[in-house]
Amino acid sequence: MHERNSADSAGGWATAVNKKLNVETATSNDPNRSYDASASAQLLRYCGGASLATNFNPKTLKGGVKGKLDGEIALAEGRAELHGYLPDAEGCHVKFNAPGLQNKEVDLGGMRATFELALGGFAGASVLA
């Protein structure tokens, strides 16, 4: 009997390729970094769903039922993100002595500005019934 490898099917091939299509910056553990970048792509994804809703008015004794089916297939989907930090990912630590509090040290922690830029794309089809 022939054993079938999951990579032989289109779904198995897509799963194997999708694992290799995610990229991140190598310096993500460096607290002095000024940006993080990542990119990901996925092939041959699908999803589907169904919903059912009912309503009833006891005063008029009328009601209704609504149903919905939907499905989506993505031949290719991708996303790239860039996060920028000012002054850096750890931020600027803010401490000062407060004269009104008998010169006690006040520690506000790290402060930074964060900027995000994202770009995404999708090629596929969607069905709603």
Image (cartoon, grey):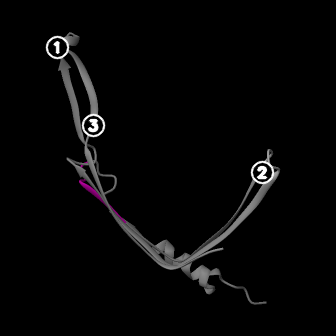
Residue identifier under label 3: 110
Quadrant of the drawing holding the C terminus:
bottom right
* Quarter of image, res 117: bottom left
Q: Which mark is residue 56?
A: 2
SS state under label 1 = helix
Q: Nearer the viewer, mark 2 or mark 1?
A: 2
Question: Mark number for residue 126?
Answer: none
- First in residue order: circle 1 vs circle 3: 1
Say whether residue 10 is left or right of residue 57. left
The type of residue carrying mark 1 is Pro
Q: Which mark is residue 99?
A: 1
Q: Is residue 52 visible?
A: yes
**What residue span does the magenta drawing correspond to?**
32-38
Tag 1 and tag 3, C-beta contact below 8 Å: no
Q: Residue at x 80, y 45 (%)?
A: 58
- Callout 2, which amino acid? Phe
Which quadrant holds residue 112?
top left
- Vertical position of residue 13 compared to residue 65: above or below: below
- Give the structural element (helix, strand or loop) at label 2: strand
Q: Is residue 88 left or right of residue 48?
A: left
Q: Nearer the viewer, residue 126 or 33?
A: 126
